[in-house]
Amino acid sequence: MESRTRTERDGSVRIRLATAYAVGDVNCFVLPGDPLTVVDAGESAAAALADLEAGFEQLGLRIEDVEQVLLTHHHADHVGLAHQIHERSGCVVAGQRLLLDYLTDARAQRSEETEYHVGVLERNGAPPDVIESHRALQVKLFGGVESVLVTAPFDDGAVLEAGGRRLRAVVRPGHSATDTLYVDDAGGVAFVGDHLLSDKSSDPLVWRPPGPEPDPGQRDSVLSLYREALAQTARLDVDLMHAGHGDPVEDHAPLVASRLALHDQHCERALRALAGPPRSAYAIAEEIWGEKVRQIPYDLISMILGSLDLLRTAGSARVELGPDGAFLYAAAD
Ligand SMILES: [Zn+2]
């Protein structure tokens, strides 16, 4: 059987952990040295724990030896086992300050996030049965979520000792509201979570804005924020990026350029679909993707809203409020 554990050229060790998500395995990185550090912690599930334990055993280590867990963002496939690692080792759990809101009561936060998604789908014309099945799927996925107390919250720019290196924390919301990069400037290496993946575009789902009871009629233009974040990342002076899924990114600037070009293509496709009377984002998505929108409505609505936001910023699209409170989009006059 192929090993799930691999030592990378900078000396970090990547352990692939199974997940229940469509994305497949998630990477957990072990930084041997002082303090013994783990970057990201899989989902809370028996299969992921078994993979993690097998990886540690291969390294001659135990989970009880971990001294620090660093978190790249709040998504369940990256934080689920952090609580258990902390329980068994007494390690520090470090992450940017906003993660306290997301992870201290992760299930409550997740259910608020789901309700926000429902609101966004309603305001963008999704039919009730599609919304209900999206809600049911989210509730099912709550299984991989587990709360964890971030014992060492930090702010953007914090410098952390980890596995004999110094890592600079760069808070860079984009793929999610809590994205954090850990940059080893001396070694020319960064741990980037899902901010940039080698084999797929990690465009953001429309996220629930931090803070109490946000109005689903108000949302951040998450794709625009992500593109700004990516442009900054393209200028980062490292030659190896360890990502949350898949192989490391060796040459990040051209990869960022290709991601930005893909967004431009999506905009062109959205603009073609805007001919005719004003329509909801759901109706536009249905025209582009057909039946597929019923299966993954939130992913595709997020994608089309990202394109529509960029088109509006460029002056090529406009939005109005329909009679039932749904947003309707059309080409600008
Ligand atoms: Zn992920």
Image (cartoon, rainbow, N blue to C red):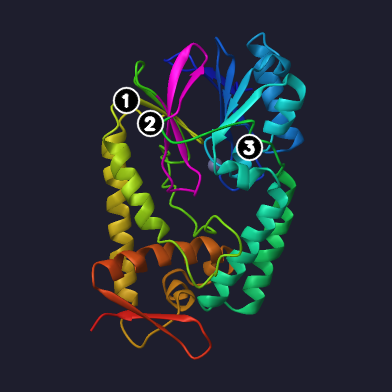
Magenta extent: 158-183
Label number found at residue 238: 1
What is the spatial separation of the Cα atoms under label 1 and label 3, in whole angstroms? 25 Å
Q: Residue at x 68, y 68 (%)?
A: 133
Q: Residue at x 59, y 14 (%)?
A: 36
**Front residue of 305 and 217:** 217
Q: Residue at x 48, y 42 (%)?
A: 179
Instruction: Give the amino acid type for the residue marked by disc 3 in the picture.
Output: Val
Q: Is mark 1 within 8 Å of ligand 1?
A: no
What is the spatial separation of the Cα atoms under label 2 and label 1, in whole angstroms? 10 Å
Q: Is residue 35 left or right of residue 327?
A: right
Label number found at residue 249: 2
Q: Is mark 2 within 8 Å of ligand 1?
A: no
Magenta stretch contains residue 181: yes
Label number found at residue 79: 3
Vertical arrangement, residue 34 with respect to residue 318, above or below? above
* Structural crowding at the residue carrying mark 1, measured as other residues with C-alpha within 10 Å and reported as few (<14), some (14–19) or many (≥20): some
Q: How many marks?
A: 3
Of labels 1 and 3, earlier in sequence is: 3
Query: Mark 2 against mark 3, which lies toward the viewer?
Result: 3
Q: Residue at x 66, y 76 (%)?
A: 129
Magenta stretch contains residue 276: no
What is the spatial separation of the Cα atoms under label 2 and label 3, in whole angstroms? 22 Å
Instruction: Give the amino acid type for the residue marked by disc 1 in the picture.
Output: Val
**Front residue of 83 and 51:** 83
Residue 229 horizontal/vertical position (percent): 35, 45
**Secondary structure type for disc 1:** loop
* Structural crowding at the residue carrying mark 2, measured as other residues with C-alpha within 10 Å and reported as few (<14), some (14–19) or many (≥20): some
Residue 313 horizontal/vertical position (percent): 28, 67
